[in-house]
Amino acid sequence: MGGTISVAEPILGDEERQNVEQVLESGQFLQGQFVESFERKWADYVGVDHAVAVSNGTVAIQLTLNALGLEPGDEVIVPSLTFGSTATAVVHQGGVPVFADIDRDTYTLDPEDAERHISDRTRALLPVHLYGHPAEMDELLALAEEYDLAVVEDAAQAHGARYKGTTVGSLGDAACFSFYATKNITTGEGGIVTTDDAEMAERLRLLRSHGMTSRDDHEVLGYNYRMSELNGAIGDVQVERLPEFNARRAEISERLRDELADVGWLRPATIREHVEHAYFWAPFEVQTECIGMSGREVWQALKDDGVETRHRYTKPLYEQQVFQSHDGFNGEFPWSANERDHLYDESLPVVESIAGRVIGLPNHPNLTDDEIERVVEAVRNFADENGGDGNERP
Ligand SMILES: Cc1ncc(COP(=O)(O)O)c(C=O)c1O
């Protein structure tokens, strides 16, 4: 037995180090040739005309909504089971996140429930390609067309995923990616917006750098959301390694799905035939009624056995304190101004039934075949050791 098997690892090599070294030697930390080159490569990889690098995935969403002209109090429909910043970024822009239910199988925004939540203040849909599985974009794009809404893809977890043959990030009006350290590729911290819209790209470039058109001119209310050259230097190499990383992630994740197919208490997440999963996670659903344990307890027990897993998201976003207490802009805005407190009284059936059940097994490209075998064994032995009757699927 070795040490603990980690669930995620950034993979950095000599080329990344050389690039970083070059930036350190130059003393040029402001976004420059590496950030620009990274943007060009990312746009080409995704298949769009423009990519605008920023300091993280959260501000990528905020700036995109800003560039789309989101006005204070405008509503944006988001899935209720995702990382918090999908929704807090809407609030940062003065908008109101409206929580919709998810598809039972893919955990992504349910188009029918999204439609139910459309009001005359709705301006955009913000589907998340959760765990690396693309949302049902055809239905969502049709809905957007019918109601004249923008579509922003939250592709933070879906580097290189494909929907009906098209790479995600090129399907909506714009898409936002994160390069946080656990993601399929990393820049340390970082994010990027992709779009085919030249005007939007121009506006994003302005917004990310103080709204300045020249050294002395602040044209619009901007921010300092630039990606530093150090982060760009890493991204410029990582983007080239992404296809190889993703191939290994897929190989490992599919092996886990195959080898654990007959374990009754663990159901592999559905992967629709028309998608290519990015396998940010290798997601499985804990069949609590079968093993007699919660997702949390499974997570803890596997951890004690030296296998780290992911266990998120355990709480629907509408139950989070920040939305329950309407704690945006000192509690004043946009909540009370809009008298929309009822939006957070939701109890959405699919989200409620999934929250806390999904775990992600280790699947990062650094894993050796022996380590993968150890993960398989730990899971296979689990039911016996923990007294579950776990091999009958309900
Ligand atoms: C679905 C989703 N959206 C947005 C973000 C925000 O990205 P960042 O952490 O780079 O701000 C994340 C990050 O983890 C995410 O998983």
Image (cartoon, grey):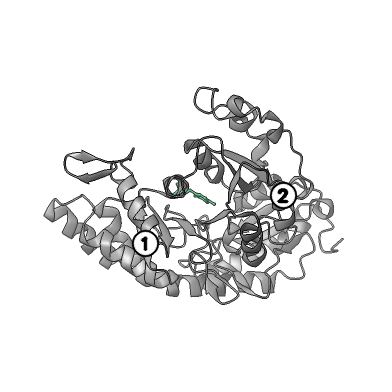
Q: Is residue 226 visible?
A: no
139 or 348: nearer the eye? 139
Q: Quick one: which residue is furthest to the left in this view?
A: 26
Marked residue nearer the N-terminal end (1 or 2)? 2
From the image, tell me which residue sits under label 1: 198
User: In the rendered view, would you say 63 is above or below 19?
Assistant: above
| Gap in angstroms between the C-alphas marked 1 and 2 | 33 Å
| Residue 87 x %, y % | 56, 42
220 or 305: nearer the eye? 220
Q: Residue at x 36, y 51 (%)?
A: 204
295 or 189: nearer the eye? 189
Q: Quadrant of the C terminus?
A: bottom right
Instruction: Determine the secondary structure under disc 1.
Output: helix
From the image, tell me which residue sits under label 2: 101
| Residue 26 x %, y % | 12, 55
| Residue 145 x %, y % | 62, 60
Q: Residue at x 21, y 57 (%)?
A: 32
User: In the rendered view, would you say 339 is above or below 250?
Assistant: above
Q: Is residue 243 left or right of residue 277?
A: left
Q: Quadrant of the N terminus?
A: bottom right
> Which-is-in-front pick, marks 1 and 2?
1
Amino acid at the residue labelled 2: Asp
Amino acid at the residue labelled 1: Ala
Q: Is residue 382 left or right of residue 168?
A: right
Instruction: Determine the secondary structure under disc 2.
Output: loop
User: In the rendered view, would you say 342 is above or below 83?
Assistant: above
Determine crowd level at label 1: few under 14, some 14-19, many 20+ residues with C-alpha closer than 10 A.
few
| Residue 67 x %, y % | 42, 49
Q: Residue at x 46, y 50 (%)?
A: 68
- Disc number at residue 38? none
